[in-house]
Image (cartoon, helix red, strand yellow):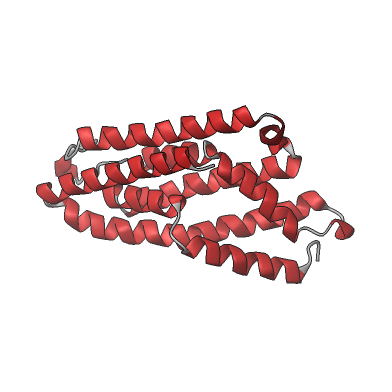
């Protein structure tokens, strides 16, 4: 095995427990699923998972040491990410009840492409994810086995698989419930307001974190 099986098992269990606890990623996917349907929820998860793959690659390459050398860079990225989430939330509330596609064709309030890109950008602009991968993943890598890059890659694959298992399930279920509610105009407006408020809250939380 190119990786210590005991470390791999410990990593899988620890990551699963951490993901089950509701966090920003899960809440974001939940909001996308409620507003755009099961497909949007799943594609939002795919966007988040893609950004996680990038973060793992960055951590493995050691490029995220920039945040330690230049704390201002960390703050700038965090503020930009928070502002983006607040912007999305405000736009949803302002345009509540509107849909991007023709309602007669069953259009939803968020396309799959929008969900994917927003999941990707939101998580990429979360420097906490970068520092998390730097602090967390190396604990489960054994330099004595060699092929450190391969070990990081295996851990990254496990992390992405768990992302789809947990948050993907949440997104699909939220989409099923949201699809029923979106058939009612008043309920759809409330979904947009609730989702917008959720995104604004996540943005404020991200900006306030240290």
Q: Nearer the viewer, residue 192 or 111?
A: 192
Q: Position of residue 156 (x, y in %)?
A: 65, 53
Q: Nearer the viewer, residue 204 or 175?
A: 204
| Image: 89 above or below 146 | above
Who's the residue at 33% across and 54% down the image?
A: 38
Who's the residue at 58% across and 47% down the image?
A: 52
Q: Position of residue 5 (x, y in %)?
A: 75, 70
| Image: 10 above or below 42 | below
Who's the residue at 48% across and 48% down the image?
A: 46
Screen quadrant of the N terminus: bottom right
Screen quadrant of the C terminus: top right
| Image: 37 above or below 102 | below
Q: Position of residue 94 (x, y in %)?
A: 21, 32
* Relative horizontal placement of residue 58, taking residue 118 as reference (left or right): right
Q: How many marks?
A: 0
* Relative horizontal placement of residue 92, taking residue 77 as reference (left or right): left
* Relative horizontal placement of residue 72, taking residue 139 as reference (left or right): left
| Image: 135 above or below 142 | above
Who's the residue at 37% across and 37% down the image?
A: 114
The answer to whether any part of residue 165 appears in the image is no
Q: Position of residue 120 (x, y in %)?
A: 49, 40
The answer to whether any part of residue 2 appears in the image is yes
Question: Would you identify the image quadrant in which residue 176 lies?
Answer: bottom left
């Amino acid at each position: 095995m190119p990786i210590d099986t005991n470390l791999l098992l410990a990593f899988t269990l620890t990551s699963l427990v951490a993901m089950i606890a509701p966090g920003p990623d899960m809440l974001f996917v939940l909001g996308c699923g409620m507003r755009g349907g099961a497909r949007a929820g799943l594609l939002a998860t795919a966007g988040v998972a893609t950004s996680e793959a990038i973060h793992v690659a960055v951590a493995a390459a050691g490029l995220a040491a920039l945040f330690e050398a230049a704390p201002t860079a960390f703050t700038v990225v965090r503020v930009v990410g928070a502002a983006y989430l607040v912007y999305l939330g405000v736009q949803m509330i302002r345009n509540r009840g509107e849909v991007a596609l023709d309602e007669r064709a069953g259009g939803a309030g968020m396309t799959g492409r929008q969900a994917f890109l927003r999941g990707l950008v939101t998580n990429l602009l979360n420097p906490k994810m970068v520092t998390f991968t730097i602090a967390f993943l190396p604990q489960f890598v054994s330099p004595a086995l060699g092929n450190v890059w391969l070990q990081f890659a295996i851990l990254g694959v496990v992390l992405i698989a768990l992302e789809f298992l947990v948050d993907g399930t949440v997104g699909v279920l939220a989409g099923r419930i949201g699809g029923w509610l979106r058939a009612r105009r008043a309920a759809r407006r409330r979904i947009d307001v609730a989702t917008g408020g959720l995104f604004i809250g996540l943005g404020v939380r991200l900006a306030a974190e240290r």
